[in-house]
Each structure stands twice: as C-alpha cells, then as structure tokens.
Amino acid sequence: MAQTMAKAGWKLTALLFAVPAGIAARKAVDVAWKKARHSDPPANPAAPGTTWTEALVWAAISGVVFAAARMVAARGAAATWRSLTGSLPPGLEDSTV
C-alpha cells in the first residue's frame, strides 16, 4: 500500500513540474520563432502549405527545447521529492554510486 501511495505521489509531483515546464517551453519556442522569422510558427508543420524547410526547422527547434524542458522538470521534481522524503522517487536509481 505504501509503495502504491509513493508511486501516486511521485506521479503527481512530476506532473506539477511538467505542466509549467511544457507551457514555458512552448511560449519560448513561439517567441523565438516570431523574433527570428517575423511570422507566426507553423500551426501544423505537416500541412501541405508549410514548406519543408519551415517544418524541419520547427521540428528541430521544438524537439530540442521540449526535451530540455522535460529533463529540467524531471530533475526538479526528483530533487523536490528527495528533499521532501529523503529518498529517490520510485523507479529512479542514484547514478552517482
């Protein structure tokens, strides 16, 4: 029972970090695109009206930014979990050993 509660608590903690990180990443990518291209980012990069160059650049930029945001959120959530409970979150191993 305690293990189930710990897993649920960890998922909630991770979600509380992931949502704002995703929102911030999306806004950052949109602002960067608008400053660099002086136009709105492609609403649907797969649409026929979007050029291949635009679609590929959008995919590369957003992929890097969202991967970084995911990593920042996961590490922040894990650090918070560890500070609150004194142990690593369920499913994570300490790689410093």
Image (cartoon, rainbow, N blue to C red):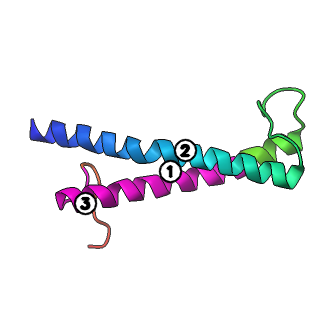
The magenta stretch is 60-89
Q: Which residue is mark 2?
A: 22
> Which element carries disc 1, helix, strand or loop?
helix
The answer to the question of whether label 2 and label 1 lie on touching residues, with beta carbons closer than 8 A, is yes
The image position of residue 20, as x and y in percent, is 50, 45
Q: Secondary structure at mark 2?
A: helix
Q: Residue at x 26, y 52 (%)?
A: 89
What is the C-alpha distance between the residues marked 2 and 3?
Answer: 22 Å
Residue identified by numbered label 3: 82
Of residues 60 and 15, the one nearer the viewer is: 15
Can residue 60 be seen in the rendering of this structure? no
Indicate left or right for 6 with 48 as reference. left
Magenta residues, dominant SS class: helix
What quarter of the picture does the N terminus occupy? top left
Kindly identify which numbered label has been placed on residue 70: 1
Give the residue type that dot 2 points to. Answer: Gly
Q: How many other residues sit within 10 Å of disc 2, few (<14), some (14-19) or many (≥20)? A: some
Return the disc, 2 or 1, that comes first in the chain's sequence.
2
Amino acid residing under circle 3 = Arg
Q: Gap between marks 1 and 3, in whole Å? A: 18 Å
